[in-house]
Amino acid sequence: MLAVLLGRLATVPGTLPGAVSQGLIWGVMAIGVYITFRVLDIADLTVDGSMATGGAVCIMLMLMGCNVWVAMLGAFAAGVLAGLVTGVFHTFMGIPAILAGILTQLSLYSVNLKIMGKANQAINVDKYELFTSLRWVKEIALHNPLVTGLLVTAVLIAVLYWFFGTELGCSIRATGANPNMSRAQGVNIEFNKIIGLMLSNGIVAFSGALLSQYQGFADVSMGRGAIVIGLAAVIIGEAVFSRIFRNFALKLLSVSLGAIIYYIVIQVVIQLGIDANLLKLLSSVVVAVFLAVPYWKSRYLRPAGKSGAKEVDPHA
Amino acid sequence: MLELKHLYKTFNPGTVNEKRAIDGLDLTLQDGDFVTVIGGNGAGKSTMLNLIAGVFPADQGDIILNGVRLNNLPEHKRAKYLGRVFQDPMTGTAATMGIEENLALAYRRGKRRGLGRGISNAERELYREKLASLGLGLEDRLTSRVGLLSGGQRQALTLLMATLKQPELLLLDEHTAALDPKTADKVLQLTEEIVSGSHLTTLMVTHNMRNAIRYGNRLIMMDAGRVVVDIRGEEKQNLTVRDLLEKFNIENDRMLLSE
């Protein structure tokens, strides 16, 4: 039995480049989730839909003959629009954020079908000039998805680091941190939430564009459960790196690293022979437990502090 | 000059919980007035401040600050004219952001927020100077997260944020009620220094009658959504807690307790 397991584990290193590439692409998506979930303090379920929208728009634009960069820009813009819809639902129409996201996500399912004309559209890596592809994962070249994934992540983190240091970016962070204080300081928090949702979904759709190229097709259900994977990446990143990464740029990096760890773990689990149908169940359980830990800590453990430490051992 | 004219506000109208919180309130503040506001629970003190700040709209009446009618402006636009400090030290600052980031947000109150830098180095010098004037040692902790500060430090910081850009009106809503007595005194002292230093027109709600008498140049008492007592000038200076209690037959428990 052990020998069988070890034998299966021995195949893991060969699958690592693929797992890491996938982790990098989903890391981009998770950085989008971080903006809503951690910066704005909104759980935005739009992403399940906007991920597929990004993939659909990118593939269809390329099939129509657009340059890959134009196609990816189009995907980003489509995601921004999706975020705008959720933002308007939430602020102007007063719908709770979770429900606003679900409404957009559901309507995007129809939109995505309309964009693609059917549930799935493939793109041939030999006939089109893609930015990234699974095919090149073991090539030593600039278009290796590991390289492109790293490049995209680095540029994205740099741009976001700059943006959240601007006046507007700071006021968006304040909106999530304390809406009352923000209003009192003249911040238009409704406007800021919309901007944040647009930016987040633009990034998620861009990640969808990368993923569809990487796997060679866009699928109407490719974003199903994306929010859970995004949250898993955010949470794993924080659990592993929060003690050493305090700077905002490093926090974003930890989200990307969280996604990579997530995909490596998934890869190992698959290699060990687990039923792949159970993966989404596993992901949900892991995310649920990690989300519960801070709550349990605050509820059942004494706050760790100097006075607390004294109370613990009165005989010392 | 602040003018409140025939203000009305009713919460939950048409239900069993209907509550007329402000009932035909008239009040005029001259420039530089430092007015302390007392009154029992439900007298409408906080509601008055929230109406001015735009937390919720008035049913009727006018709110006019230096000639500008505020009624139809949303809360974040009124913020341009107002400095506010709240009862809960958690409300006025963003805990997960740094001291300098909080100050920088306040420094841009009433301005358009674009893609310029969130904090400039020149500002940092200003903040260091202002923080030093609080005397709490915060000037060496510019980048510390505000969540690490004590309640008193946070209130002092909120006060600084409210006045960093000189407001046309400063609204203090029981801003020392959540602090221990010693810290409360310190924050009140700071309040007086800042208010008198910049001649700020100020409304300060308090439950502590002694403080209401000691600070400011004018004292008003509210009851059932109106001003029922208005004492200023010399009469205010000679006022004692006993006078207040006897003259105006105050029966509110909480006010007596905090006396």
Image (cartoon, coloured by chain):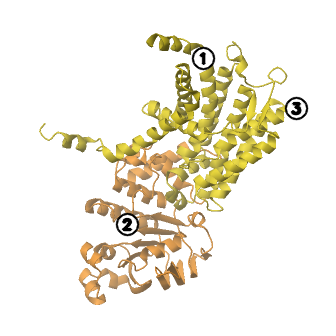
Chain colours: A yellow, B orange
User: Helix or strand or loop: what does disc 3 sit on?
Assistant: loop
Question: Is residue A188 among the parts visible in the rendering?
Answer: no
Q: Which residue is mark 1?
A: A15
Chain at tag 1: A
Q: Earlier in the sequence, mark 1 or mark 3?
A: 1
- Kindly identify the amino acid type of the residue bearing the numbered disc 1: Thr
Q: The numbered mark 2 sits on a residue in which chain?
A: B
Residue B192 marker? 2
The mark found on residue A65 in the picture is: 3
Q: Position of residue B138 (x, y in %)?
A: 38, 47
Q: Nearer the viewer, residue A62 or A309?
A: A62
Q: Which quadrant of the figure contains the C terminus of chain A?
A: top left
In space, the residues marked 1 and 3 are separated at their CA atoms by 33 Å
Q: Is residue B198 above or below residue B4?
A: above
Residue A205 x %, y %: 70, 39
Q: Name the subunit of mark 3.
A: A
Residue contact between numbered discs 1 and 2, judged by CB atoms under 8 Å? no
| Residue lying at 49% horizontally and 64% vertically, measured from the top left | B83
10 Å neighbourhood of mark 2: few (<14), some, or many (≥20)?
A: some
Question: In what element is the residue under mark 1?
Answer: helix
Kind of residue indicated by mark 3: Gly
- B200 sits left or right of A156 in the view: left
Residue nearest the observer in this picture, A30 or A219 = A219
Query: Residue A152 appears at what percent x and percent y?
Result: 67, 29
Q: Which mark is residue A252?
A: none
What amino acid type should be assigned to the residue bearing mark 2?
Glu
Q: Is residue B27 above or below residue A145?
A: below
Residue B111: quarter of image: bottom right
